[in-house]
Structures are given as C-alpha cells and as structure tokens.
Image (cartoon, rainbow, N blue to C red):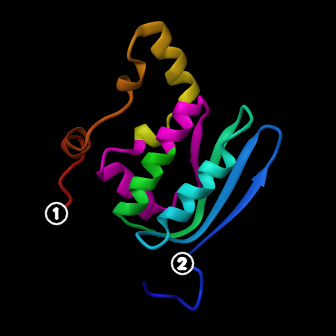
Amino acid sequence: MTTFPYPVLTISAERTQRGVLLRLAGELDYESAGELLDAVRAHLPGIGPDGLRLDCGELTACDSTGLSVLLMSRRLTTAAGVALHLDNRRPPLQRMLEITGTLAHLTVSAAPERQEASTHGSGAQHTARGPRGARGSRPDTG
C-alpha cells in the first residue's frame, strides 16, 4: 500500500441532538473509501431526526469506489430509518451522480420513502432510476 505525505480524505464529525454532519475534504477513492464507511457506521447509532448529512463541499475527487461507498451509506441509513443528505455537491460529483443514474437515489430522504413504501407498496422505486434512464434522458454532449 502506498503511503501519502498528507491525508487523502479528511472527515470531521459534528453530532447534535438533531443529527450528524460529516464534513469530507480531499479524495473519496479506492484508498480512502473505507474511512467514510467506518465513519458512517460509527455515527449511525442514536442519530437524530435530521439524519446524516455529508458535506461534500471540499471533496476534490470521487471515483467508482467512492460512489459505491456513498451507495452503501445510503443502504445503511435507509436500514436505520434515517435520511442521508449529500450537501454542497460540487459539479464533478453532481455530474457523476447524474450520469450513473444515482442522483435521485442518493438525494431523496429515507423517511418519506419508508412512509410511502408502507402506504403505497414499493415507494422507493418511484424515485430511483437506473443508468439507462439517466443516459436516455440526457442530450448527447459529444
């Protein structure tokens, strides 16, 4: 494993009575993705009604492994019945989420889905779109 002279990803946590804010700075990639997953798991118990907020404003890169960890984080928060919020998404992250069709899945709160699912059956499927739907709805940019 390569060691870096600086941290690839820095995560700072702020817990309040209403929820948890994890501020991400640096690169969310193969080398650092496990750190975010560990932080999510560590802060999930006893989380408040505002759920888990990931502040992505200082995130400089996110590769496919980083995206995978965001999806795993969504799975964990949904299972716990709390919302996951991706705040301050920079354009490269926003574009990745749009292209992969994961934007709606990662940005719709878990609580309404859970409530809708119990009222209307499989409510979570109304907002999630697969990669084909995302690509098919975007104009060809070359």
Image point (70%, 51%), residue name: 21
Gap in angstroms between the C-alphas marked 2 and 1: 32 Å
Residue 109 in view in this figure? no
Closer to the chain start, of discs 2 and 1, is 2
User: Which numbered disc covers residue 8?
Assistant: 2
Which amino acid, by three-letter code, is at mark 1? Gly
Residue 6 lies within the magenta run = no
Answer whether residue 84 is magenta in the image. yes
Based on the displayed image, in which of its 4 quarters is residue 29 positioned? bottom left
Which secondary structure, mark 2?
loop
Query: Is label 2 in contact with label 1 (beta carbons under 8 Å)?
Result: no
* Residue at disc 1, secondary structure: loop
Residue 100 in percent (x, y) is at 30, 50
Q: Where residue 45 appears, x then y in whole percent?
A: 69, 40
For badge 2, the amino acid type reads Val
Picture quarter with the N terminus? bottom left
The quadrant in which residue 23 appears is bottom right
Question: In the rendered image, is residue 117 in sight?
Answer: yes
In the rendered image, the residue lying farthest to the top is 119
Counting from the top left corner in percent of width and height, residue 138 is at 24, 46
Looking at the image, residue 78 lies above or below residue 25? above
What label does residue 142 carry, if any? 1
Q: Nearer the viewer, mark 2 or mark 1?
A: 2
Within 10 Å of disc 1 (Cα), the crowding (few <14, some 14-19, many 20+) is few
* Residue 42 vertical placement versus 59 (above, below): above
Identify which residue is drawn at 65% across, 43% down. Answer: 44
Task: List the single residue furthest toward the right.
Answer: 17
User: Which segment is the magenta one?
Assistant: 74-103
Q: Position of residue 30 (x, y in %)?
A: 40, 69
| Residue 63 image-quadrant placement | bottom left
